[in-house]
Image (tube, helix red, strand yellow):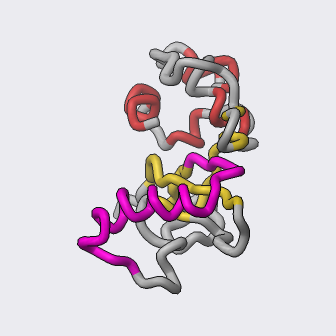
Amino acid sequence: MKQFQTDMGVFYGNALSDSNGIDDFKSLYTSKYLQTKFQKLWNGPYITEETNIHSILGSYYISYYRDDMSPCEAKGECIAFIALTEMPLETWEFINSYEDESLGTSVERETTKNLTGKVRSLNLKSDKVTMLYKAVEKRTTR
């Protein structure tokens, strides 16, 4: 996604013709989901398959939130997260521990660990969770 955003010259979601999450993810494989003016800048594929289905971890899609996990607004900061829908809770905890807690050397607060860092989830209360992986950001300029 970082290379895609670099090639387009704009925030990831701003290059898409219709942002709906699934097509947002598929735009990493084909340029047909991009606005016409960005199609010539597309240098992909950026992933090896067009599918948004993983045989174990569910569906992939792109979801957009601000850093505090509130919805993005038209103007202002926004983060594109890669979402996986059927992640076993134990797998999420391992990935979070590896990515955000440096394998236990930098432990996050238990009450907010799912809402901060690169690895997030809006629900850790079931056996399967949707993992959100912080991919690229749009920052406001002053």
Q: Residue at x 62, y 17 (%)?
A: 30
Residue 115 can be seen in this image: yes
Q: Residue at x 30, y 64 (%)?
A: 103
Q: Is residue 131 left or right of residue 107?
A: right
Residue 52, given in percent of the width and then of the height, sits at 69, 32
Q: Nearer the viewer, residue 49 or 67?
A: 49
Residue 75, given in percent of the width and then of the height, sits at 56, 60
Work out whether 8 lies above or below 102: above
Q: Is residue 89 inside the magenta stretch?
A: yes
Work out whether 36 lies above or below 14: above
Q: Residue at x 46, y 38 (%)?
A: 10
Q: Specify the segment rendered in magenta.
A: 82-108
Residue extending farthest left: 105
Residue 114, given in percent of the width and then of the height, sits at 53, 72
Q: Quadrant of the C terminus?
A: bottom left
Q: Is residue 101 left or right of residue 64?
A: left
Q: Nearer the viewer, residue 95 or 120?
A: 95
Q: Nearer the viewer, residue 84 or 69?
A: 84
Residue 108, given in percent of the width and then of the height, sits at 38, 78
Q: Quadrant of residue 35?
A: top right
Q: Is residue 37 inside the magenta stretch?
A: no
Q: Is residue 70 left or right of residue 23?
A: left
